[in-house]
Image (cartoon, rainbow, N blue to C red):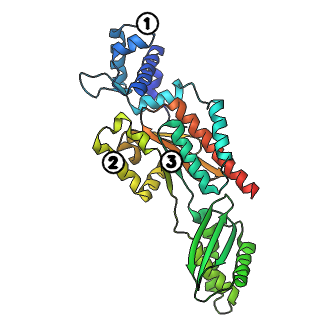
Amino acid sequence: MTQTPSQEEHRLTERDREILKAVILSYVVEAEPVSSRSVSKRSGLGLSAATIRNVMADLEDEGYLMQPHTSAGRVPTSAAYHLFIESMMHNRRVPAKVRRYIQENLASVLGDADDLMEATTHLLSELSSQMGLVVTPAMGDTVLKAVDFVPLSGRKVLCVVASTSGFVDNKVVETREELDREMLIRISNYLNDNFAGHTLRQIRDELLSTMAEERAQMDRLLGLAIELARQGLDLDSGPKVIHEGTPALLTQPELADVTRVRRLFDTFSNHAQLVGMLSQCIEGSGVRVTIGDESELTSELDFSLVTTTYGVDQAPLGSLGIFGPSRMEYEKVIPLVHFLGESLSRALADMYVDT
């Protein structure tokens, strides 16, 4: 689920853990370095500030706390957050009321898969008060359910591609000759009969291979099908990042500095780079937590990214997650990301069955 805890964790006593947990929870709420005095007052551990100060100094030596300024209190490190997530976090379930709210919202989406992506992004942001992210699939890697060609004016044709996972892509192409509706139906039927169940990338590669092998005896229907598929199956449309929640992030103390705000906008203005950085943060199944300098995306702002994948029939299609300050409420965010990943996958599967 996350990084493996370091061996130093096993040397921590129960008292060490309780004090570290108190520091983490206090910092999540207050966004201010935590002093031994405040831990002594609020934790209910019954320990003096001097005792807690000594333990916090030891935790700093172990790499779990750091002191931003010599006169300030201490703040958790990424190692502290990972330890908290692995062994000190208790709430790993989304409340029933929130689960119902998510299910009702996704069930009310009557459009295509793209509408589900938008709804999921909104839910991620709304329920976490952070930035919600959804990475959509690259169309070239989606599996064809049906393709339809609609005549427009002159030699222009609208290509409508529906994938088995509910995604629909529209593209206007221009043919070498004007084609009537009857011929376009014949071409659509040919592609649907022969290539439904293949990825768009496989279809175009097979058609181009056929064109190279059978150029001499290729009939008109096949030639037109190859031409329309070559133009209409848009394989250059890579994954996209849908995000929502920038206003919520701008209220966080971490973004009080204009320079950090500029970094945030620079990061999210380059979608190709953003997709690449998000892809590096996702490995394996389940929920992954990336904190601070563990990735290029989170290190610039000392933020965290909590991500999981979604898909249909065990085949991953994309990823979703929550992006925000490292002091985020992991007890709330991790179960939320996990549940929304599962809910989106079920909604896409239901959309496929219904259609």
Query: Which residue is more in the foreground, 205 or 41?
Result: 41
Q: Amino acid at mark 2?
A: Arg
Q: Disc 2 marks which residue?
A: 263
Place residue 74 in its image quadrant.
top left
The residue to which callout 3 is attached is 133
Q: Secondary structure at mark 3?
A: strand
**Label whose residue precedes the other's in the sequence (1 or 2):** 1
> Dot 1 lies on which element?
loop
Q: Amino acid at mark 1?
A: Gly
Q: Quadrant of the C terminus?
A: bottom right
Mark 1, other Cα within 10 Å: few <14 / some 14–19 / many ≥20: few
Q: How far apart are the alpha carbons under marks 3 and 2?
A: 17 Å
Q: Are marks 3 and 2 in contact (CB under 8 Å)?
A: no
Q: Looking at the image, tell me whether mark 3 or mark 2 is earlier in sequence order.
A: 3
Q: Position of residue 64 (x, y in %)?
A: 39, 26
Quarter residue 191 falls in: bottom right
User: Would you say 225 lies left or right of 124 here?
Assistant: right
